[in-house]
Structures are given as structure tokens and as C-alpha cells.
């Protein structure tokens, strides 16, 4: 189905099932521990052996010798895979560094060997017996040090930014930084690989089945049709599982070497230095305004680093679209760093970008003597500021800010920082705009009606804890006029039609639109089979009816069932309209006047993100994202050892993420919105929106509480102490 | 993890004798620290002596009016004990500020005292670390040092002792009771129990090889207000950047010990004479000679401010 004109009324608009806060259909499996995760699939194939990965002890250089002899003789060892014996391996489209290193080493903990043994413990013990000698090479590990040696690219420019900035009567010019971040999802990367001749099956934990299948085929030099990837349940990914990683490649190589199925899970320290992470940024923001508060010049530059051939963190993206202003520029600059590979994590681009931009907006509002909300409202735009002929499909940022201000009691905020005290706490409120683009990608599904009236949906879409199973079931139930318990959903299998996958908050809208398309086809087939006129047939209560004739839906299915398959594909609506999602984030913090410890008191997100397909799962997404915002604002930071070139705090004791005690109260409001430009579902992404802006709202609240402006994340107590009053 | 043999000791003295007999032997109590370290091959015992069955899990009143806490008393049980909550509130609060409920259910009194540092380089066997591998160097010095020690450090090691409980024990003047491989018992004052790193950061206590902790005794209660204040980046389940354990009497005198600043719980008795004069005076003497790094110099003002808040709370 091609979607190239705005949606009109369709069966989804009935909202009998879609739009309802129904419980997750996979909830019981999760809460009873019976949802099978990749590493636990002991039942899918017999005779599984265990692989343990060895990582490089240096960040850059060469392996001069690798001695496997003792490890080979260790109890239970079946095989050891290294670059020497693995055969030729290509690099996939989505990887920057090779997934099996050696002799050249590109980053710390780059995999250099896999030990396969009868038991996990044997594999792990033998892995420690491998002796590796290296020669180190000089590497670059400090972004701040080398950022200026890298010129500009990816610039956007409109009007005369430089001139307008110089001329502006009120302006700020600030530098901000965000550190490297780790996804830190609960379930580590894990795969079980089994060969049957030249056919390979992998049970894994992956967000993007089709990308990963393609890259696995490329890496191993195996025909793509000979590979099957199965990933029905995923214990969190946050971007860390968008791509093929070494667990999958090494499980496949290990299985080939050992001649039997092999399972590999990455140990926790590998999450930090072996897999991808969100790169650190340094950002310079300049804003100039007239005295009335209208922005006349806005410029945003961001520096980040990656391995050779890698990409930048697009921290300037939102600045091209969020506020009005005739003169504007953005630039992304990429330095070569020899730290582990950077890549997408939890709202890449906007998350770190807004952490900087929305502090700058707070600073600017203060300079102008304007309330931070009024300043943002004043600079709202309903069109793409770089191309005013291109409107936003929907943009309710102002409504988000106003609704949130009401709900949160913004009028009680004292605009003078450092004035409100509650016992040992300095109390402050902060606000930030949230913004995240809505991305459209083709997505397919197959639907089958069987003779008992059950509709089964199959798509390679993944559920990374987000609720995909549930909203897909709701979509099929709505379309086919059956109750939810008459829908079965099967996900995460490369044998199913290719979907959008999960990432960039594009999963919900696109994958359900794909299911919609397949259901439209199935409805046509049903109507034909039952001899109805397709235009006026109504699907409801497991019946198909027209006029006074009603036939059970199940009757349309023969013994073999009735199957339809289709995909949603998009025309140029995304070019003609800017599609984005908007939020206003409000936070109240307390800062301990003596110690500088910041603790969240309450949070509110007001979101405008198209139709909310399931308010319950959507809310869960948003509160989870807000929690990530707390992490980014207050504690998450990969500490870089700038001499040896690695992330030092590589476990969950050293890399802190929020715990329950950090999150006392969260509220989420969804504005009533449908976006007919986005898809037949009229929905958009919402998960990552819940994170975008939160960090700055917290930093702004800390400023309001204390009068101390911190521009380098995370805002830890050591950065506040000197500015706090005598306790 | 290396292969190891395992035995259940029959008595404390037998456990100590067995430990002295077997090269590379270790006691195992709750296992919450030791097992993690074994998985990473930071500790590679060849033989484990399980001390869980030694009936060292009781809390008894001593004839002097104090408490004798068995080495195997779980942190949860110790924190919840009525006598501890009433007379040694500091200890109860310090325990509850540490780890998580699940860990405290397993963790023991002796194991807690002997838990190893959380220096991140100690946990990475690719990095030099004098504590893990004597003579290999110290990767932390010149590296990421924010969580590390500011006082009592050496050129060989700047790690901290991570325990909360031990800081309270230090302020309470506890005594560590042991039995040695030859069967004799002794009591080690807590002040002499943990060592500074010096040239041998791998030797963390004054326990002799094979010596088993049987109990920790507390002298009779000293009264006063008991405050344990742990400062950290998140609200729970994190080690202290700095912690202050204080006992403050109505006249303003008292005791102070610090966590998160040194290789052992940090207490300078002479500094306590300054308590009536306030936090600044105390902190100056407590931290005299501190040698922080650029990254952890904030711990010095943090100690003073936190102590100020604690003394104010004691007054209020
Ligand atoms: C995630 C996490 C967070 C934590 N957070 C905190 C925190 O915030 N604050 C805090 O204080 N602690 C914290 N801890 C540490 C915890 O308190 C210790 O792991 C625990 O107290 C160790 O006790 P155990 O009985 O399990 O010791 P084990 O692991 O069994 O033993 C530890 C050491 O003590 C030795 N040993 C044990 N018993 C004896 C004995 N009777 N005589 C001689 N030697 C003995 C062992 O040989 C071993 O060397 C945390 C731990 C973890 C894993
Ligand atoms: S500070 Fe101590 S524990 Fe840390 S690396 Fe140095 S020697 Fe090892």
C-alpha cells in the first residue's frame, strides 16, 4: 500500500480497540519469567556448546603473538576462533570496526577470540589462559584535545547568521558538553547459532532483524536466504542492538568450528567497551535576539568523535527545526578517536542536542528578562524555518508548554534562582521543550485468518519491551473486527515480512501501518470470498455484515486459512511536510544545600505525538524515557582513560543509572492529536520524545534551585559545591 | 574462574588451621564480594573454606554491657537488631545505607569488613594494579580518580575502602575478635585492623595468614546522637563519595569517622576535640595532609560541608 496522500476516515478511527489502555498481551510471559530470551533457548536445538569472548587489552595497535596452546588443552575446550583461523570476514554495512579483530586492533575490548567449551565455566576459565602480546600504537582518546583539528562539514545555513549575531542586542555564546554514554540495558547481547549444512539459524536479541541478517550474510560471506534470525523477546536495546554485534558473528563462527550449536552472551564489561555507545559531544550555541525576545540569529555547532569511517552524533538536528529565526547555521564536526565505536543510543541526536540547546534557551530567557515558557512560545514556528513553504504536519509545542505549566504549577516558580528552601533542600523548577522527528520507513506484515476466526499477524518487527506485540494486536483486532484474544502476533523472525524494526521511535507508527496495509488486503479477500460489496462491508464482533446480511468472519477462511501480505510504503509527504513530535518537560528538583546532591522531586511530560495507540504502553515508554533523562542529567558518564583509551567504569557499579529511589513521581499527559500526514494510523513515535529535553529541564531546575549554571553533564555535586551557600 | 576445592569447616579453630595449611585458601561467607572477584579472576583461590556453618551468627550481650556480634551475622539481621537500633543507631544506619536489601541478606559482618576496594582499575585485569598484582604499578594514579582516596594514600595505591559498616564500627571503637591457625584467640582494635596502602596495598588488614574473624565486639553504649550521612551521585545502591559517621553528645563533644576518603575508615581522635568549635575546625585536622587529585579534590570541601550539616542536625 502506497501512502502518498493524507489519510481520510478509515477503520482505525473507530477506536474500539486501538487507543485503549489495554494490558500487554505478552505481559504474563514477562511477569512469570516464561518469555524466552535468546540465551535461555535451551530447547530450540540440541547439543549447545558455550562460547566466551576474549577482548583486546589495548585500544590501538597490533597483536604480535597469540598463544592458544594452554587454553586448547584446558578441560572441555572444543574450539578456539581467532582472526587467524576464522577465514575471510567482510565488514557489514552498519559496523565501523571489525567484529573480530586481529592482528590489527581498533579499540579496547575488540573481540579477538572466542573459546568454545562444553560448559560456560570451562569456556570462561580457558579464555583466561590465552596469552596475547601486543605492540601499542598511539591513539587519540580526548575529544576536547583534538576537536579543533577537524574542519566543518554538514553545515546548514540560512540568511546571514554571523552578521545577525553581531548585530543582536541580546545574545549568548555558550559551550556545553555531554559525556560518552552506555546503553546499559538489562539483557546483554546474546546469540545461539546452529548450522545445518550451509544454512544458519541464529536465536538472538536484536532490534533490526533485516539489517542484522544482511550484515551477518555479508560478514560471513553466506547467502542471505540461507540465514534465519529469530528474536521474539529482547531485554532492552536502546540502540545498542540495532546492529550485528560480535556475539552473533562469533556464535556462528564458533558453531562452525566446533561442529555443533554454540551460544554466546557478552559479559557485562563488554557492554561498555566492546559494543557501541553514545559518543560524547562538545557543543557551541549562539543565540541572538531583539529586545522583545524574538530570535534573530541561532547557531549550533557540535563536535563528536568516532573511529575512522564512523559517523558524528547529530546533536544539531533539532536546532534546524525547533525555533524561528531568520538567520541560522548548524554544523557537525567529526574527529577521529580511537575509543570504542560510537553509534545510536536512546534518541541519538536530539537527546544530547537538546541537553545543550534547552539550557541555552533558559539562559537566553533570563538575559531577556522573559519567562522561559514565554520565550519559547514567542519563537514558535509552524513551518520549517529553513524552508517556510514546508509546514509541520502537526505542531502543538505551545499547547504542550501551556498545558504543562498549568498542571505543574509553574506560576509558583520563583524566577530568581536560589530563593526557595525546604529544610535542607534548595528547591527549583525547570522546563525544556522536547522534540524528536517522526521517521517513515516501509514496513510489511502478513495476516492469516483461520477457520476458528483467529487472526495471526507475522512480521519481523521486534518488541524490545516497548509494547509492539500489543499495539500490533490492537491494530489487527480493529481492522478485522475481532476481539484482542482472537489475534495472535508473531514477531522477530526473518522468515516473516520485513518491517521497520525498532529504533528511532519509528517502530510503532510504521509497523502498525504495515499491519493495517496487510489487513486492508485481507478484508478485501474476505469480502470477495463471502460475496460482499467491498465498499459497505462492516467488520465487527467477528462478523462481516452489509445491510441485513451478516456472516461470521471465520467462514471466509477455508481449512487452509486466508492469507494476505502487504507493506506500507511512503510517498513524498515527508518531503512536503515536516513531521515531528513535541513535548514540554517539567521538573522540580531539590539540591541538598550542604552536599550538593540533586534529587528529583517530581516530573511531568506533556506530549503531542499523533494518535496514541495505547495510552498504557505509551505512558510506560515515556516514563522510562524520562528516567533515562534523569540518568543523563545527573549521573551517567563513561569515564575515559585518556592514556590507555578505554571506558574505565565498565560495570553497573561504576556506570550509574537511576534506581527507584531516584524517581519519586512522574506524570505523563498526551495531548489529543491525530496526524493524517504520518500514516493511516495517524500515529507517530513517542518513546524517545519522552527523553528529549528532560536533561536540560533538570539542569535548568538545578539552576533555578541554586543559581549555579552547569553546562557540562552530568550535573554532579562536585560541579555545584563551590556555588552553594554556606550550609 | 579457576577451579578450586571446597570444604566446610567443623570449628573456627579448624577453619583457621585449614586455611594456614592450604596455600591459596580463602574463607567464604556470604560470597557477595568474593564470588564476583573470582569470576573476574581478580581473586583466584585454590581452596574455599565455607564458614557459614560455624554457629558464628549470634548477637550477644557482653559482660561489660556491650555487644558481641558473630562474624556470620547477616547485615540485614544486624541492622534490624533491637539492641543495635537502640544503642548503636550509627551502625544500623550505616548498614542500611549500603548495598541493597538482597545483598544485605547475604553479606556478613566479617565479609563486610574485608570487602575489597571498588577502584575501577582493580576490576580490570588488563590494567596494572599493585593491589591485585603486587609490583605491576597503579593504573589509577594519573587516570580516572574521582571516586578514589584523598588521604593516607601512597605512590603505590590511592584506593578507598568501600564499606559503610566499617566506618560506623570505627566510630564505635569496635574490636575484631579472631582465632589464629594455632587455635589462640585475640582481639584487634578496629583502629589497628585496616592498613594504609603504603608499599603493599595488597595487604589490607593486620590479620595473619589463615586468621579467622569470629566476632566483632562493641563496648558499652556511649549515648549521644548517632548520625550516618552517606553522600553519593544517586539516591541508593551506590558507594559513598564521602560518608560521615558521627556520635554527638548534648555538650557538643563526640566522635567522627569518614568513609570514601581513604584506604581505611578514617578517624583522627585528636580532631574530635575540635567538635564544639564546629565542622571547619574538625575537618581541618581530620584531613590535614590530604593529597587529593584534581578530580577528587571536591571531597575535601564536601567532607566539611557534610560534617557541618551533620553537626547542625545533631543540635537541632
Ligand atoms: C552491587 C553491590 C553493591 C554494594 N554496595 C555496598 C555499599 O554501598 N556499601 C557497603 O558497605 N558495601 C557494599 N557492598 C559490599 C557488601 O557489603 C559486601 O559484598 C559484603 O559485605 C561482603 O560480605 P560477604 O559475607 O558476602 O563476604 P564474602 O564475599 O563471603 O567474603 C569477603 C572476604 O572476606 C573474607 N571472609 C569472610 N568471612 C571471613 C571470616 N569470618 N574471617 C576472615 N575472613 C573472612 C573472605 O575470604 C573474602 O576475602 C556492595 C556489594 C555489591 C555486590
Ligand atoms: S589505586 Fe590501588 S586498587 Fe586502584 S589501580 Fe591503583 S593499586 Fe590498584
Image (cartoon, rainbow, N blue to C red):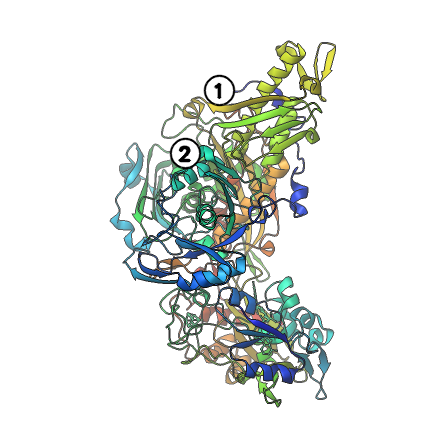
Q: Is residue B97 above or below residue A349?
A: below
Instruction: Tell me residue A540's x, y (percent).
Output: 70, 20
Residue A591 appears anywhere in the view: no
Q: Residue at x 48, y 20 (%)?
A: A2
Instruction: Tell me residue A342's x, y (percent).
Output: 39, 47
Residue A596 appears anywhere in the view: yes
Q: Which residue is mark 2?
A: A321
In the picture, which quadrant includes the C terminus of chain B?
bottom right
Quarter of the figure with residue B25: bottom right
**Lower sequence index among marks 1 and 2:** 1
In the image shown, does A277 or A378 lie closer to the viewer? A277
Instruction: Tell me residue A687's x, y (percent).
Output: 53, 39
Residue at mark 1: chain: A
Dot 1: few (<14), some (14–19), or many (≥20) neighbours within 10 Å? Answer: few
* Numbered label attached to residue A2: 1
Tell me the CA gap for discs 1 and 2: 27 Å
Quadrant holding ligand 1? Answer: bottom right
The answer to whether mark 1 and mark 2 are in CB contact below 8 A is no
In the image shown, does A435 or A271 lie closer to the viewer? A271
The residue tagged with tag 2: helix, strand or loop? loop
Residue at mark 2: chain: A
Quarter of the figure with residue B295: bottom left
Quarter of the figure with residue A386: top left
Dot 2: few (<14), some (14–19), or many (≥20) neighbours within 10 Å? Answer: many
Q: Is residue A476 left or right of residue B139?
A: right
The residue tagged with tag 1: helix, strand or loop? strand
Q: Is residue A641 above or below residue A340?
A: below
Q: Is residue A165 above or below residue B14?
A: above
Q: Is mark 1 within 8 Å of ligand 1?
A: no
Amino acid at each position: 500500500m502506497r501512502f502518498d496522500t493524507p489519510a481520510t476516515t478509515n477503520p482505525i478511527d473507530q477506536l474500539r480497540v486501538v487507543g485503549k489502555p489495554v494490558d500487554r498481551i505478552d505481559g504474563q510471559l514477562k511477569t512469570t519469567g516464561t518469555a524466552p530470551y535468546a540465551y535461555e533457548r535451551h530447547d530450540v536445538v540440541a547439543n549447545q556448546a558455550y562460547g566466551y569472548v576474549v577482548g583486546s587489552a589495548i585500544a590501538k595497535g597490533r597483536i604480535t603473538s597469540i598463544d592458544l596452546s594452554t587454553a586448547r588443552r584446558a578441560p572441555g575446550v572444543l574450539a578456539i576462533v581467532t582472526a587467524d583461523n576464522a577465514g575471510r570476514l567482510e565488514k557489514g554495512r552498519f559496523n565501523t570496526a571489525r567484529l573480530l579483530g586481529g592482528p590489527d586492533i581498533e579499540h579496547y575490548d575488540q573481540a579477538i577470540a572466542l573459546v568454545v567449551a562444553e560448559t560456560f565455566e570451562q569456556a570462561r576459565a580457558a579464555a583466561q589462559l590465552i596469552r596475547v602480546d601486543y605492540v601499542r600504537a598511539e591513539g587519540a582518546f580526548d575529544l576536547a584535545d583534538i576537536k579543533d583539528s577537524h574542519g566543518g562539514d554538514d553545515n546548514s545555513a540560512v540568511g546571514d547568521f554571523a552578521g545577525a549575531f553581531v548585530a543582536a542586542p541580546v545574545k549568548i555564546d555558550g559551550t556545553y558538553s555531554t559525556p560518552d554514554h552506555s546503553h546499559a540495558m538489562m539483557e546483554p547481547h546474546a546469540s545461539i547459532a546452529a548450522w545445518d549444512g550451509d544454512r544458519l539459524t541464529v536465536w538472538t536479541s536484536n532490534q533490526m532483524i533485516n539489517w542484522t541478517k544482511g550484515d551477518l550474510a555479508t560478514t560471513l560471506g553466506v547467502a542471505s536466504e540461507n540465514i534465519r534470525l529469530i528474536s521474539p523477546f529482547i531485554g532492552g536495546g536502546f540502540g545498542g542492538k540495532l546492529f550485528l554485534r560480535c556475539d552473533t558473528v562469533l556464535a556462528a563462527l564458533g558453531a562452525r568450528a566446533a561442529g555443533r550449536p554454540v551460544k554466546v552472551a557478552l559479559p557485562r564489561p563488554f557492554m561498555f567497551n566492546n559494543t557501541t555507545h553514545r559518543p560524547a559531544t562538545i557543543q557551541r550555541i549562539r543565540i541572538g535576539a531583539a529586545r522583545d525576545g524574538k530570535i534573530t540569529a541561532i547557531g549550533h555547532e557540535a563536535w563528536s568523535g568516532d573511529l575512522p569511517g564512523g559517523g558524528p552524533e547529530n546533536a544539531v538536528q533539532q536546532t534546524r527545526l525547533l525555533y524561528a529565526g531568520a538567520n541560522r547555521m548548524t554544523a557537525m564536526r567529526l574527529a577521529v578517536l580511537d575509543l570504542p565505536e560510537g553509534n545510536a543510543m536512546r534518541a541519538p541526536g536530539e537527546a544530547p542536542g537538546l541537553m545543550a540547546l534547552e539550557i541555552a534557551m533558559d539562559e537566553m530567557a533570563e538575559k531577556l528578562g522573559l519567562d522561559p515558557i514565554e520565550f519559547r512560545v514567542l519563537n514558535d514556528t509552524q513551518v520549517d524555518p529553513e524552508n517556510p513553504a514546508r509546514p509541520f504536519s502537526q505542531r502543538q509545542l505551545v499547547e504542550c508548554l501551556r498545558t504543562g505549566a498549568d498542571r505543574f504549577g509553574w506560576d509558583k516558580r520563583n524566577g530568581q534562582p536560589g530563593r526557595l528552601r525546604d529544610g535542607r533542600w534548595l528547591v527549583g523548577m525547570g522546563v525544556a521543550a522536547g522534540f524528536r522527528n517522526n521517521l517513515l520507513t516501509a514496513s510489511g506484515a502478513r495476516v492469516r485468518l483461520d477457520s476458528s476466526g483467529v487472526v495471526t499477524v507475522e512480521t519481523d518487527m521486534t518488541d524490545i519491551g516497548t509494547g509492539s506485540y500489543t499495539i500490533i494486536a490492537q491494530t489487527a483486532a480493529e481492522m478485522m473486527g475481532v476481539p484482542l484474544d482472537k489475534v495472535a502476533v508473531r514477531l522477530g523472525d526473518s522468515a516473516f515480512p520485513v518491517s521497520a524494526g525498532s529504533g528511532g521511535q519509528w517502530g510503532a507508527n510504521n509497523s502498525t501501518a504495515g499491519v493495517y496495509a496487510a489487513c486492508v488486503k485481507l478484508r478485501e479477500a474476505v469480502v470477495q470470498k463471502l460475496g460482499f460489496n467491498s465498499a459497505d462491508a462492516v467488520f465487527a464482533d467477528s462478523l462481516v455484515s452489509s445491510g441485513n446480511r451478516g456472516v461470521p468472519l471465520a467462514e471466509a477462511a477455508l481449512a487452509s486459512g486466508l492469507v494476505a501480505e502487504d507493506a506500507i510504503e511512503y510517498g513524498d509527504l515527508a518531503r512536503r511536510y515536516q513531521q515531528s513530535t513535541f513535548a514540554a518537560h517539567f521538573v522540580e528538583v531539590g539540591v541538598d544545600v550542604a552536599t550538593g546532591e540533586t534529587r528529583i522531586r517530581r516530573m511531568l511530560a506533556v506530549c503531542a505525538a499523533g494518535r496514541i495507540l495505547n495510552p498504557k504502553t505509551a505512558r510506560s515508554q515515556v516514563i522510562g524515557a524520562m528516567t533515562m533523562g534523569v540518568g543523563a542529567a545527573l549521573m551517567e558518564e563513561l569515564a575515559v582513560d585518556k592514556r590507555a583509551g578505554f571506558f574505565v567504569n565498565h560495570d553497573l557499579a561504576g556506570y550509574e543509572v537511576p534506581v527507584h529511589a531516584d524517581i519519586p513521581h512522574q506524570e505523563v499527559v498526551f495531548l489529543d492529536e491525530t496526524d493524517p500526514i504520518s500514516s493511516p494510523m495517524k500515529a507517530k513515535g513517542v518513546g524517545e520524545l519522552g527523553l528529549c529535553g528532560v536533561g536540560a529541564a533538570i539542569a535548568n531546575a538545578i539552576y533555578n534551585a541554586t543559581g549555579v549554571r552547569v553546562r557540562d553533564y552530568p550535573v554532579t555535586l562536585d560541579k555545584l559545591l563551590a556555588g552553594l551557600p554556606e550550609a | 574462574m579457576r577451579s578450586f576445592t571446597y570444604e566446610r569447616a567443623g570449628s573456627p579453630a579448624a577453619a583457621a588451621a585449614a586455611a594456614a595449611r592450604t596455600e591459596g585458601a580463602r574463607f567464604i561467607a556470604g560470597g557477595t564480594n568474593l564470588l564476583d572477584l573470582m569470576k573476574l579472576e581478580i581473586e583466584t583461590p585454590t581452596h574455599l573454606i565455607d564458614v557459614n556453618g560455624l554457629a558464628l551468627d549470634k548477637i550477644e550481650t557482653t559482660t561489660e554491657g556491650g555487644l558481641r556480634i558473630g562474624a556470620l551475622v547477616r547485615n540485614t539481621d544486624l541492622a534490624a537488631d533491637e539492641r543495635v537500633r537502640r544503642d548503636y543507631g550509627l551502625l544500623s544506619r550505616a548498614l542500611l545505607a549500603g548495598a541493597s536489601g538482597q545483598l544485605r541478606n547475604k553479606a556478613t559482618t566479617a565479609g563486610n569488613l574485608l570487602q575489597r576496594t571498588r577502584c575501577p582499575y582493580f576490576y580490570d585485569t588488563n590494567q596494572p594494579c599493585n593491589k591485585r598484582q603486587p609490583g605491576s604499578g597503579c593504573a589509577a594514579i594519573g587516570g580516572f580518580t574521582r571516586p578514589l582516596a584523598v588521604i593516607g594514600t601512597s605512590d603505590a595505591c590511592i584506593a578507598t575502602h568501600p564499606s559503610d559498616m566499617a566506618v560506623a564500627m570505627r566510630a564505635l571503637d569496635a574490636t575484631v575478635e579472631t582465632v589464629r591457625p594455632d587455635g589462640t584467640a585475640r582481639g584487634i582494635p578496629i583502629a589497628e585492623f585496616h592498613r594504609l596502602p603504603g608499599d603493599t596495598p595488597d595487604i589490607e588488614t593486620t590479620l595473619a595468614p589463615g586468621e579467622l574473624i569470629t566476632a566483632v565486639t562493641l563496648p558499652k553504649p556511649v549515648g549521644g546522637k548517632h548520625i550516618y550521612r552517606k553522600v553519593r551521585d544517586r539516591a541508593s545502591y551506590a558507594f559513598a563519595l564521602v560518608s560521615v559517621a558521627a556520635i554527638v553528645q548534648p555538650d557538643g563533644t563526640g566522635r567522627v569517622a569518614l568513609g570514601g576518603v581513604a584506604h581505611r575508615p578514617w578517624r583522627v581522635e585528636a580532631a574530635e576535640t575540635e567538635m564544639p568549635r564546629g565542622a571547619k575546625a574538625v575537618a581541618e585536622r581530620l584531613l590535614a595532609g590530604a593529597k587529593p587529585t584534581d578530580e577528587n579534590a571536591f571531597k575535601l570541601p564536601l567532607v566539611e560541608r557534610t560534617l557541618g550539616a551533620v553537626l547542625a542536625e545533631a543540635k537541632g
